[in-house]
Amino acid sequence: MMSLAEFVKTKRNEVKLTQEEFAERAGVALTVVRKIEQGKENLNLEKVNQVLKMFGHTMGPVDSRVLSQSKNQ
């Protein structure tokens, strides 16, 4: 499974945008894009979703028990 950081960076590069250009189009600060692509853990979900909406995706909270069950199958 691709990490959030890998997904955003890969998709951003596919559309040939710099971090600055992408941040502007997504309506977030450049630091938000940088933090996501660096794999930082303390991210604002609302800001992450603003970025993900550029690719037709969103993210929400997931119960850790559900994750562990899906890994074991």
Image (cartoon, rainbow, N blue to C red):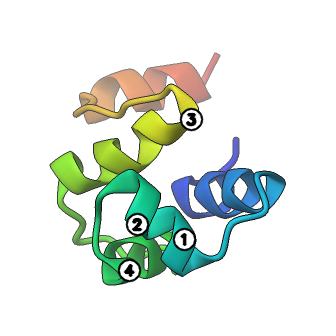
Please tell me how crowded label 3 is: few (under 14), some (14-19), or many (20+) other residues with Cα within 10 Å: few
* Amino acid on which the number 2 mark rests in the picture: Glu
* 36 relative position to 6: left or right: left
How far across and down, in percent of the image, does residue 56 sit?
Answer: 51, 26
Q: How far apart are the two marked residues, 3 and 1, measured between alpha carbons? A: 15 Å
Q: According to the image, label 1 marks what residue? A: 21
Residue at (24%, 66%) from the top-left corner? 43
How far across and down, in percent of the image, does residue 16 sit?
Answer: 78, 62
Badge 4 vs badge 2, beta-carbon distance below 8 Å: no
Q: How far apart are the two marked residues, 2 and 3, measured between alpha carbons? A: 15 Å
Q: Which of marks 4 and 1 is nearer the N terminus?
A: 1
Q: Which of marks 2 and 3 is nearer the N terminus?
A: 2
Which disc number belongs to residue 6? none
Q: According to the image, label 3 marks what residue? A: 55
Q: According to the image, label 4 marks what residue? A: 30
Q: Which of marks 4 and 3 is nearer the N terminus?
A: 4
Badge 1 vs badge 2, beta-carbon distance below 8 Å: yes
* Helix, strand or loop under label 2: helix
Q: In which quarter of the image is residue 21?
A: bottom right
* Amino acid on which the number 4 mark rests in the picture: Leu
How many numbered marks appear? 4
Q: Earlier in the sequence, mark 3 or mark 1?
A: 1
* Amino acid on which the number 1 mark rests in the picture: Glu
Q: In which quarter of the image is the N terminus?
A: top right
Residue at (30%, 57%) from the top-left corner? 27
* Amino acid on which the number 3 mark rests in the picture: Phe
Q: According to the image, label 2 marks what residue? A: 24
In the image, 26 versus 68, the foreground residue is 26
